[in-house]
Image (cartoon, helix red, strand yellow):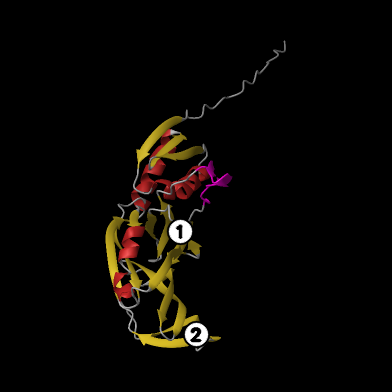
């Protein structure tokens, strides 16, 4: 008598480890995201990571969490203290300063005009301001501080007949009068260089509005302009990040006639991180 055997195959289910949410306090914050995401992608279970106030928020398995913790002990180190220094002017040897302007001459009723080119070799002094911060943290430099750093230079060209207009230019962008200063965020890179983020601080925005003046309406909007750029600089070396541009108008009158001289001067703004 033959006995029929029937075999029933049941599927075997493997239960993956449940995902949990972990919050890890870090020094590096956002800068750690690429390395942590690579670590999670390489694992069998995967996971996701975001940041919140320099904390990593992980949604992954306990095993992956332990692996990320081990990775962070290698790459997330306490930020290094850095000194950010700014100077206006140049400590180098004598520098030629060329002034150009138009002169109007009145002499015995005869008027003439001409262009004067004056080459003035003078030693440019510099004024220094420095502040200490941590790698990845912001240091603020006010526009008032930048203006004060030009006092030594301005004293050599000041005249009671001068009328001047000045502008601060950072990375080829003119800062508006409403700007309170610039924010410098240095970040030390693995190769020893420094990535510097330059941004405006406390920009005041005035919405367009209409004002009535002598029967005419005038738009009083202030044009919006924002500075936000990143540059990589060698550590311990001065680099030029902008300039202070000054236009001088010198007008004089005497018995021989009237004269008007316009001159343009540019004073470099330099940055050092060490």
Q: Which mark is residue 184?
A: none
For mark 2, give the secondary structure. strand
Q: Can residue 226 be seen in this view?
A: yes
Residue 58 in picture, x, y percent from top left: 44, 36
Q: In which quarter of the image is the N terminus?
A: top right
Image quadrant in which you'd find residue 81: bottom left
Instruction: Tell me if mark 2 has few (under 14), some (14-19) or many (20+) residues whose alpha carbon lies within 10 angstroms of its own.
Output: some
As drawn, is 203 to the left or to the right of 78? right
In the image, residue 223 lies in the stretch drawn in magenta = yes
Residue 264 in picture, x, y percent from top left: 46, 75
Residue 139 in picture, x, y percent from top left: 33, 55
Q: Give, as a single range, the part of the protein colored magenta.
A: 207-224
251 shown above or below 202 = below
Q: In which quarter of the image is the C terminus?
A: bottom left
In the rendered image, the residue lying farthest to the front is 108
Instruction: Tell me if mark 1 has few (under 14), some (14-19) or many (20+) residues whose alpha carbon lies within 10 angstroms of its own.
Output: many
Q: Which mark is residue 175?
A: 1
As drawn, is 36 to the left or to the right of 133? right
In the image, residue 92 lies in the stretch drawn in magenta = no
Relative depth, front residue between 239 and 90:
90
Say which residue appears at 50% left-offset and 65% top-offset: 172
Q: How far separated are the C-alphas under marks 2 and 1?
A: 40 Å
Say which residue appears at 39% left-offset and 46% top-offset: 29
Q: Nearer the viewer, mark 2 or mark 1?
A: 2
Say which residue appears at 52% left-offset and 45% top-offset: 42
141 shown above or below 125 = above
In the rendered image, the residue lying farthest to the right is 1
Q: Name the residue under label 2.
A: 106
Residue 210 in picture, x, y percent from top left: 55, 41
114 shown above or below 57 = below
Task: Mark 2 or mark 1: name the one nearer the start of the chain.
Answer: 2
């Amino acid at each position: 008598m033959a006995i029929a055997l029937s075999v029933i195959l049941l599927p075997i289910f493997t239960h993956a480890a449940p995902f949990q949410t972990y919050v890890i306090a870090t020094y590096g914050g956002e800068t750690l995201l690429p390395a942590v995401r690579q670590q999670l992608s390489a694992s069998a279970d995967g996971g996701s990571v975001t940041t919140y106030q320099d904390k990593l928020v992980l949604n992954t398995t306990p095993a992956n969490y332990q692996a990320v913790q081990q990775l962070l002990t290698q790459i997330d180190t306490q930020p290094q203290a850095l000194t950010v220094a700014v100077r206006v002017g140049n400590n180098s040897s004598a520098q030629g300063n060329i002034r150009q302007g138009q002169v109007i001459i009145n002499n015995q009723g005869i008027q003439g005009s001409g262009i004067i080119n004056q080459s003035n070799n003078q030693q440019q002094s510099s004024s220094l301001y420095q502040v200490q911060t941590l790698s990845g943290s912001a240091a603020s430099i006010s526009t008032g501080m930048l203006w004060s750093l030009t006092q030594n230079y301005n004293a050599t060209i000041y005249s009671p007949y001068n009328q001047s207009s000045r502008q601060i230019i950072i990375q080829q962008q003119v800062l508006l009068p409403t700007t309170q200063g610039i924010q410098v965020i240095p970040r030390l890179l693995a190769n020893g260089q420094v990535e510097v983020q330059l941004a405006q601080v406390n920009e005041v925005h005035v919405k367009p509005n209409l004002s009535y003046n002598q029967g005419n309406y005038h738009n009083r909007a202030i044009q919006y302009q924002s500075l936000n750029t990143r540059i990589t600089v060698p550590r311990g070396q001065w680099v030029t990040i902008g300039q202070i541009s000054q236009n001088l108008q010198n007008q004089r009158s005497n018995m021989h006639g009237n004269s008007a001289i316009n001159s343009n001067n540019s004073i470099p703004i330099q940055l050092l991180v060490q």
